[in-house]
Image (spheres, rainbow, N blue to C red):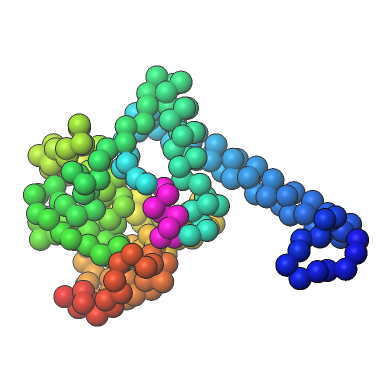
Amino acid sequence: MGRAIKGKHPSKKSRRMRVSQGKLSEMFRKEAAYRKTLHRQLANQILSVGVQIKTEKLSYRAFQKTFGKSVGVRAPGMFVTLLRRKTESAGGGVYAFNTRTTALSQVCHCGEKHKKLLRQRIHECLCGVLMQRDLYSGYLARFVKDDVLHATEANLSWSGAESLLRAAWSNSQQLASGRVSPSSFGVYRSKSESSEKENLVERKSLDVVTFGREPFRAQSTLGS
Ligand SMILES: [Zn+2]
């Protein structure tokens, strides 16, 4: 085994080191297996409602830069690959559209544009729409064709979809498994509640969704 010499790696690994490395790789193996199970469950859940998937074309590498380790653990890119394979073998597919031409988080089906900071979790428009922003973007994604949002179609279908989305939003607060949805999702707000509450919610989810990329401007949108 020899002495430790500064600047030199030991030529032989000690028994204790080998044991530690073995334990570590076992932990990584377990983590990967668990991730695979969760990915499969989620993919099957999605497949049970449809095989034509529309999603934003995202750089999961850029995600990693912004959100760090949790992206590696959840492996969204790997999940989309799995989903693609499963939907294709079921006769469907995953269509990833351009976020620059669609910008779903910034628009309303009435035609208005609403620039939002990442920490603003609710889409609210003068036309009367009040919806959790990710659910709303998901709704709009249905009406994207060839990298363009067809807002008129989204407008026509809205009255039928609103209550469904509202129910999904309300249910998200307490998942069936007993887990609470991530605070980045924002808290449910009924249409009659004042927007004062939303400010509180946004403040609460701040530390979860705000990282480096967006300048931290805590006061700029509150109370507006
Ligand atoms: Zn609107």
Magenta stretch in the rendered image = 60-67
Quadrant of residue 146 within the rendered picture:
top left
Residue 58 coordinates in the image, percent (x, y): 34, 45
Residue 196: x %, y % from top left: 24, 76
Does residue 104 appear in the picture of this structure?
yes
Asked whether 124 or 193 is in front, the reply is 124
Residue plotted at (31% across, 36% down):
96
- Residue at 46% x, 34% y: name it: 81
Reply yes or no: does residue 69 show up in magenta.
Answer: no
Q: Residue 62: say if magenta.
A: yes
Q: Is residue 187 visible?
A: no
Which image quadrant: the N terminus? bottom right
Q: Is residue 73 above or below residue 44?
A: below
87 with respect to 167 (left or right): right
In this picture, is 90 found above or below 138?
above
Number of numbered discs present? 0
The quarter of the image holding the C terminus is bottom left
Indicate the position of residue 35 as horizontal and vertical percent values.
Answer: 59, 45
* Magenta stretch: helix, strand or loop mostly: helix
Reply above or below: 168 against 115.
Answer: above
- Residue at (83% x, 69% y) in the render: 4
Is 205 left or right of 33, judged from the image as shown? left
Instruction: Residue 147: give x, y in percent of width and height.
Output: 20, 36
Residue positioned 21% across, 74% down in the render: 221
On screen, residue 91 versus residue 44, left or right, reads left
Q: Which of 199 and 106 is in front in this view?
A: 106
